Image (cartoon, rainbow, N blue to C red):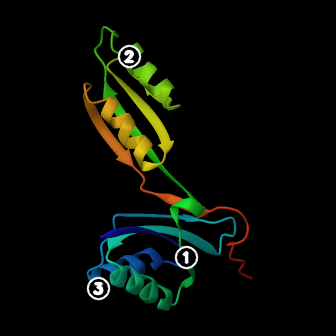
């Protein structure tokens, strides 16, 4: 089993994300993560899909997705030629006496995380990075009660200008 990250450039039409997810579902392909967002040109959406499988399955995924009407471009984002990021929001319980607060702040500082909300008994931390950075941060929070956690999944782009797709 290998993990692969695909970057899709699609028409920004209603239901396009559903059609892509439906293709994966109908074919029994695994979606480890999927993110979508409008590009600089509002006619197009970039969708990042992370999937796992053997070489044959991963090859079939690319071929089947490429056939979809709304798909303008699909490319594999290779780790050495791309930048991947993920966003996590983590709500941590801190005692009302605030003794844990400096400890959590210290861990957040090490990872360049931002404190985005502070309440009497909780703190919300925003962290952006690759999956290993997020996992390392969460491991250091092991002794604290995580009240809620939200992760976006991977999004990414290829490095440089060589692989840019121009649509008119």
Residue 27 % position (x, y)? 29, 85
Find the distance from the CA under tag 3 to the CA under tag 1: 20 Å
Q: Quadrant of the N terminus?
A: bottom left
From this view, report whether residue 137 is shown above or below residue 161: above
* Residue situated in front as seen by the camera: 132 or 68: 132
Choose the circle earlier in sequence order: 3 or 1: 3
Q: Provide the residue designation for mark 1.
A: 75
Residue picked out by circle 2: 103
User: Measuring 38% from the left and 86% from the top, which residue is drawn there?
Assistant: 60
Q: Residue at x 42, y 53 (%)?
A: 152
Q: Circle 3 is placed at which residue position?
A: 27
Point out the tag, 2 or 1, that comes first from the N-terminus.
1
Disc 3 on helix, strand or loop?
helix
Report crowding for label 1: few under 14, some 14 to 19, many 20 or more residues within 10 A (C-alpha).
some
Callout 2: few (<14), some (14-19), or many (20+) C-alpha neighbours within 10 Å?
few
Which of the 4 image quadrants contains residue 31? bottom left
Q: Quadrant of the C terminus?
A: bottom right
Tell me if residue 23 can be seen.
no
Q: Nearer the viewer, mark 3 or mark 1?
A: 1
Mark drawn on residue 67: none
Q: Name the residue: 47% across, 36% down.
A: 126
């Amino acid at each position: 089993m290998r993990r692969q990250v695909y970057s899709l450039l699609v028409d920004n039409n209603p239901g396009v994300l559903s059609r892509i997810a439906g293709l994966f579902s109908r074919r029994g392909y695994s979606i480890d993560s999927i993110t979508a967002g409008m590009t600089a040109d509002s006619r197009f959406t970039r969708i990042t899909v992370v999937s796992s499988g053997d070489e044959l399955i991963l090859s079939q995924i690319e071929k089947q997705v490429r056939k979809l009407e709304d798909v303008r471009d699909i490319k594999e984002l290779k780790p050495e030629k791309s930048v991947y990021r993920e966003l996590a929001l983590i709500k941590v319980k801190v005692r009302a006496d605030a003794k844990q607060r400096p400890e959590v702040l210290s861990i957040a500082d090490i990872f360049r995380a931002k404190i985005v909300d502070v309440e009497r008994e909780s703190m919300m931390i925003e962290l952006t990075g690759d999956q290993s950075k997020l996992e390392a941060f969460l491991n250091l929070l092991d002794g604290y009660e995580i009240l809620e956690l939200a992760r976006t999944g991977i999004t990414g782009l290829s490095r440089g200008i060589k692989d840019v797709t121009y649509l008119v």
